[in-house]
Amino acid sequence: MTDIYEQAKDKLDNFIKNDILTYSKNRNYDYGPKNRSNVSHLSKYITHRVINEYDVINLALSEYSLTKIEKYVQEVFWRVYWKGWLEHRPQVWSDYYEYSNNNSNSEAYKKAIEGTTGIVCFDNWVEELVNENYLHNHTRMWFASIWIFTLNLPWQLGANFFMRHLLDGDSASNTLSWRWVAGLQTIGKHYLATASNISKFTNNVHKPQNLNEDALPLNENKTYDLIDINYSTLEQSSDTLLIADNNLSLKNHEDIYSKYKHVYLLYLSNECRNIELSENVLNFKHSILQDFSNKYSKSQIVSGSDLKKEMDITQNIDVIYPCIGENHSFLENNKNNCKLNYIYGQEDLFCWKYAKKGFFNFKKNIPLIIDKIIKSKDFFI
C-alpha cells in the first residue's frame, strides 16, 4: 500500500542529507525533469499538507543552523506568507475565482495550451507541465511572463492552466505569483523573461527569440483593502469534522480527530469546481485522501455533492480551516443554513500577523517565528 506521508518524509530526508547546503547556489537552474536534485521537489506534499511547512523547516533546522540554510527556509515560508497575504485580502481571490473571458476561445490561447506557439522553450514547458504535472519554479516565472507579455494572454487564464495541471497547485501561491509576474502584486514591479536569463539557467538548452523584453507592467486600476484577521480557534461544536484535500496532516492532530464521531475528507470533482483540474491532478488528490483514510479508519471520503446534502440537514459542522481558495469557496457557497465552525492552526495565525505587507517585512520576522512556533511544541494544534 502506498504511504504518501513516508514518501514525503523520505524525499525530505534525502534532500536534507544530500542537497540542501547547495540549494541557494543551484536553485535557479532548471536541469530538466530528469534532474531535480537542486530543489526539494516536496511541493505536491506541502500543498496538501501531507507534510506541512512547519514540519519541513523543523526537520531542516534540526540538522543545520538557519544561517546555513536560510534561503531554503525563506522559500518554504513564502508559501505561508502568500496564504496570510490572501487571508488579509480575500477579494483578490474572489475576483480571480469569478473571472471569465472570451479570450479562452481565441486562437492564441488554444496555441498556448496546446504548446504550438512556435516559442520552442514555452511549447516544451507546456508538454512538461501536462505530462509531468510540475515545472521548476524559475521556469514558472518565465512561462508566466511569456504568457502575459509576449503572447498577450490574460494572466487569469494562465493561472487556471497551472492549477489544472500542477500537482502542487496552491490557490494562494499560484494566484499571487501570477499577479506578481504581471506587476499587479507589487504595483509597477513585473517580471520579464529574457532570452539571456533563460539560456543561462537552462545551461543553454533553450535560447528563445522574439520575446517581449520591454513590456510594461499590467494595471488593473483597482486597490484591495487590507482586512484585519481576527480568527480564533473554536471549541468542538459538532460530532462531525470536515477536512479538505489541502490540510491532510495526521502528525500531532490525531488527538483532535479522535473527538469526533464522523471525520469526512472532502473530495471535489470538476463538477464542484470553478477551476477544472486534469485527470492526473484529481487522481493524485483522491490518492492522498485515500491514504489518509487508510491510516485513520474513522475517516471517510465524501464528494462535494454528498457534502451539500449533509449541510442541508445538519446545523453545524467543524472544519479544519482550508484557507482562502477553491475548497473554502465551495464550502461558503454551499453551506446554506449549516454553520461552519472553522478550526485554525495556531502556527498559521501567528505567521499571518506578519503577512500584511510585502515579504521583506515577513522575512525579517522569520527568526522570531522560528523561536515561537518551530522550536516550541506548544504551538502545534
Image: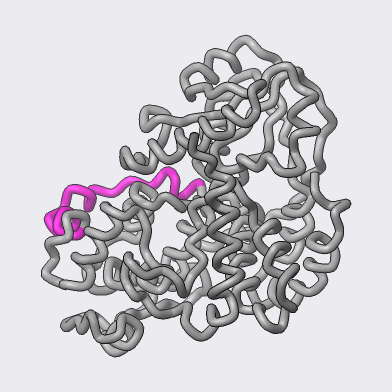
Q: Which residues are magenta?
A: 94-112
Q: On the rendered structure, is 81 left or right of 218?
A: right
Q: Is residue 106 magenta?
A: yes
Q: Quadrant of the C terminus?
A: top right
**Residue at 65% of width from left, 60% of height from top?**
56
- In the rendered image, is residue 94 in sight? yes
In this rendered view, identify the residue nearer to me: 55 or 344. 55
In this rendered view, identify the residue nearer to me: 68 or 225. 68
Q: On the rendered structure, is 187 left or right of 270?
A: right
Percent coordinates x, y for residue 269 in the rendering? 40, 30
| Residue 283 in the image: above or below residue 52 | above
Which of the colour schemes (rainbow, by chain, secondary structure, one colour) is used? one colour
In this rendered view, identify the residue nearer to me: 205 or 223. 205
- In the rendered image, is residue 218 in sight? no
Q: On the rendered structure, is 90 left or right of 115?
A: right
**Residue at 59% of width from left, 50% of height from top?**
90
Q: Quadrant of residue 231?
A: top right
Q: Is residue 312 magenta?
A: no
**Residue at 32% of width from left, 52% of height from top?**
161
Percent coordinates x, y for residue 168 in the rendering? 46, 53
Report the predominant secondary structure element of the magenta stretch.
helix
Q: On the rendered structure, is 42 left or right of 379?
A: left
Q: Quadrant of residue 54?
A: bottom right
Percent coordinates x, y for residue 309 in the rendering? 53, 13
| Residue 381 in the image: above or below residue 335 | below
Percent coordinates x, y for residue 112 in the rendering? 20, 59
Q: Give the total number of marks visible in the rendering.
A: 0
